[in-house]
Amino acid sequence: AQSVTQLDSHVSVSEGTPVLLRCNYSSSYSPSLFWYVQHPNKGLQLLLKYTSAATLVKGINGFEAEFKKSETSFHLTKPSAHMSDAAEYFCVVNPGYSSASKIIFGSGTRLSIRP
Amino acid sequence: DADVTQTPRNRITKTGKRIMLECSQTKGHDRMYWYRQDPGLGLRLIYYSFDVKDINKGEISDGYSVSRQAQAKFSLSLESAIPNQTALYFCATSEGGGRAGADTQYFGPGTRLTVL
């Protein structure tokens, strides 16, 4: 069975400090993994995705994530948080079936930035 | 102009009413999706369509139906709305092709539906 777990429902960091949002997945196949961001009252926007190429994936706005198969993790990081990073972040796994019905969203992590 | 638009943006209705949510896209994508978002649950897939003649049920299709009127339009209907269908609804599109499951989804701004 496929699943995705975001380990923290809420993360709060100070502006200028590193950000770490954790995601673990379970998949019987070689999955594609995504991070999406949702700003208040907005739709979701792709931050980055892993599709079996380089394990370290760079995204927009200075975010990156590393696919670690041995740990079944795909944690999202950013070296220095900015106030505009405050949003909800979703980790998404697609196990590679042709059917879209297997897309699974994590429950989300709300990122707060302290001045 | 936004690539994926949803109408209405907000809707309040009563139990038992029929409701239609509409989605239009100008991205030229073949694939379209409907999701609902509930607090603490992430997004769950209701229906998806890989082309005009292809409609598929997602994880939570009971109580919903869809219509793909054209490549650019994908509507979601609640035949008889009930309070637990109160949620934020998102339409999304993707281009398809390439490695299965690897295509990026592009989301509309959402429709907030309240069923009293």
Image (tube, coloured by chain):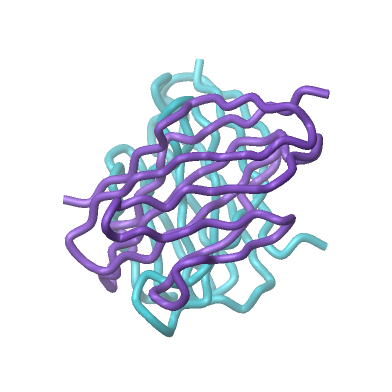
Chain colours: A purple, B cyan
Above-or-below relation of B79 to A12 = below
Above-or-below relation of B112 to A98 = above
Exactly how many numbered labels are in the figure? 0
The residue under the point 28% across, 57% down is A102
Quarter of the figure that contains the N terminus of chain B: bottom right
Q: Looking at this rendering, what residue extends furthest in the bottom direction? A: B98
Of A52 and B75, nearer the camera is A52
Residue A46 visible here: no
The residue under the point 52% across, 39% down is A21
Image position, residue B30 (x, y; %): 50, 77
Of A114 and A79, nearer the camera is A79
Residue B29 visible here: yes
The residue under the point 52% across, 67% down is B104
Image position, residue B78 (x, y; %): 42, 39
Of B107 and A60, nearer the camera is A60
Above-or-below relation of A90 to B58 = above
- Residue A87 location, quadrant: top right
Is A71 on the left or on the right of B50, as rendered? left
Image position, residue A2 (x, y; %): 22, 51
Image position, residue B91 (x, y; %): 54, 53
Above-or-below relation of B87 to B54 = above
